Amino acid sequence: MKVYLTTPLYYLNDVPHIGHAYTQIATDVLARYYRKEGYDVFFLTGTDEHGQKMEQSARAAGKAPQVFVDEQVEKFKALWKRLNISYDDFIRTSESRHGEVVQKVFKKLLEKGDIYLGEYEGWYCTPCESFFLPSQLDNGKCPDCGRAVHWVKEESYFFKMSKYQNQLLEHIRDHKDFILPTTRRNEISSFIKEGLKDVSVSRTSFSWGVPLPEPVFRPGHIAYVWIDALLNYVSAPGFMREEEKFKRYWPADVHLIGKDILKFHAVIWPALLLALDLPLPRTVFAHGWWTVEGEKMSKSRGNVVDPWKVTEQFGVDSFRYFLLREVAFGLDGDFSTEAFIRRYNADLANDLGNLFQRTLSMVERYFHGKVPATGKVAPEDEKLRFKTEELPQKIRKHYEAIELHNVLSQIWDLITLANRYIEETAPWKLAKTNPERLGTVLYNLLEALRWLAFYLSPFLPETSEQMNRQLGSAGLKSPPVWGQIMPGGTIRKGQPLFPRMEKQ
Ligand code: ME8
């Protein structure tokens, strides 16, 4: 009953933006869901602090690398706090608890004969911290980011990745959930079938990294930043440090990443794990890429979406909601203020907000703010109850497949049905003709809202709490059972959850 979830470790030379926030929020939703379901969840995030890029950024800022990263990391932590990211551990690759494990792993692989000394000669893209063969370049530029590459020739240790090619292919073939979405799985299989080369895993031309331990390694080598960073997924839960804890959480259940870094996570990382005789993660899920108003986001274009600004304007929960509802999880998405406001008004202000506000207003008006007693059950009540009670089963399937947009659409089906229930039962008419029936209808609506508050909470944690507060005695926190609201409890109408937004 454990779930171990990870995000990438973000590079600290950038400011955190909508893309980083996306991965964080999606992982947070999974973590919150599994916690509510009673799982022992370990949600890990952190920062990638070593490498040539970081050393250069620190130099450009006139600071020592450690001072630079110590300052930068606070920007990430502050944003995660703002976005209510409920991580259990935050690992920084410059911490000694991590560096020690990196050194032990290198030693172990050297002893095993899976790391050997050689010389690397080829191209290097510093922004991507990636090596490329001449044949891989795109018009002489980095095939991933299009920026300039430089020629590197240095003594280097290599990891025998080629040795694990067949084992990895078999694993991918036999574990349909190992790489998701499925299109990504095919892409990786074809890549591996072209033939895996050994990878350079150490650098000597600069020093900001984990030093490889002497005398078993020659002096002056530091771990290649990607190997260093990937190892966080085992160092944080305690590999070679706290074996009890490590056994409890490893293998990871989901490594959630963007599609840009899939090869590192679905090829190099599992090959390293095979070399370490460790079980492979259950799923590596690569989500899509956000553009802004149809354009690639970049500092030079000046169109980088700052989550601080968006959440100041629209609120944290609506930002979380928009990102996970606007695109099918796994596909690319486009951010625009217009699309944001459209979705906010339609789904949050109208569907959810109105349902909640209308129901509470009627309980206030007709029953002095007290939960009414429920009476005889009509077929439409059963339909609402049935739809509510089947929600947990329906969303579970989508959570397991990491189809977060489908979780939301199931929840919204219930919201739509509840709104229709109001139209069909017309409580304002019942108020004049049949107070007992009116009580039953409002009771059912309060009950459905209590379930909604519960199942919306991974996506909209603040709203869910507000709903629970306003539902008063109706807002139970435990996994719901139909019919547990106590008649006579007090509700509080309060402000609308999502006031309508005007077009900007
Ligand atoms: O790659 N759309 O760090 P990074 C969607 N340090 N997601 C985006 C995005 C966008 N436009 N931009 C960034 C690294 N992301 C390495 C990882 S892991 C051991 C080391 C998200 O700071 C997405 O999750 O460049 C992507 O994979 C990640 O940020 C890259 O973060």
Image (cartoon, rainbow, N blue to C red):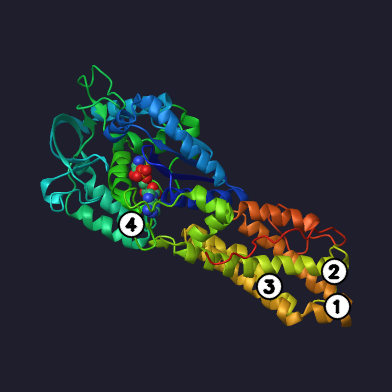
Query: Earlier along the polypeptide chain: callout 3 or callout 4?
Result: 4
Q: Is mark 1 within 8 Å of ligand 1?
A: no
Identify the mark at residue 365; answer none if there is no mark: 2
What amino acid type is highlighted by mark number 2? Arg
Residue 8 picture location, percent across and down: 40, 44
Q: Nearer the viewer, mark 3 or mark 4?
A: 4
Residue 433 picture location, percent across and down: 88, 83
Mark 3 lies on a secondary structure that is: helix
The answer to whether marks 1 and 4 mark residues whose Cβ atoms lie closer than 8 Å is no
Residue located farthest toward the top when viewing the structure as drawn: 215
Q: In the rendered image, which quarter is residue 387 located in?
A: bottom right
Circle 1 is placed at which residue position?
Answer: 431
Q: In the rendered image, which quarter is residue 384 located in?
A: bottom right
Cα distance in 3D space between marks 4 and 2: 51 Å
Q: Check the image and report above or below for 103 versus 133.
A: above
Mark 1 lies on a secondary structure that is: helix
Residue 289 picture location, percent across and down: 37, 57
Query: Earlier along the polypeptide chain: callout 1 or callout 2?
Result: 2
Circle 3 is placed at which residue position?
Answer: 418
Q: Is mark 4 within 8 Å of ligand 1?
A: yes
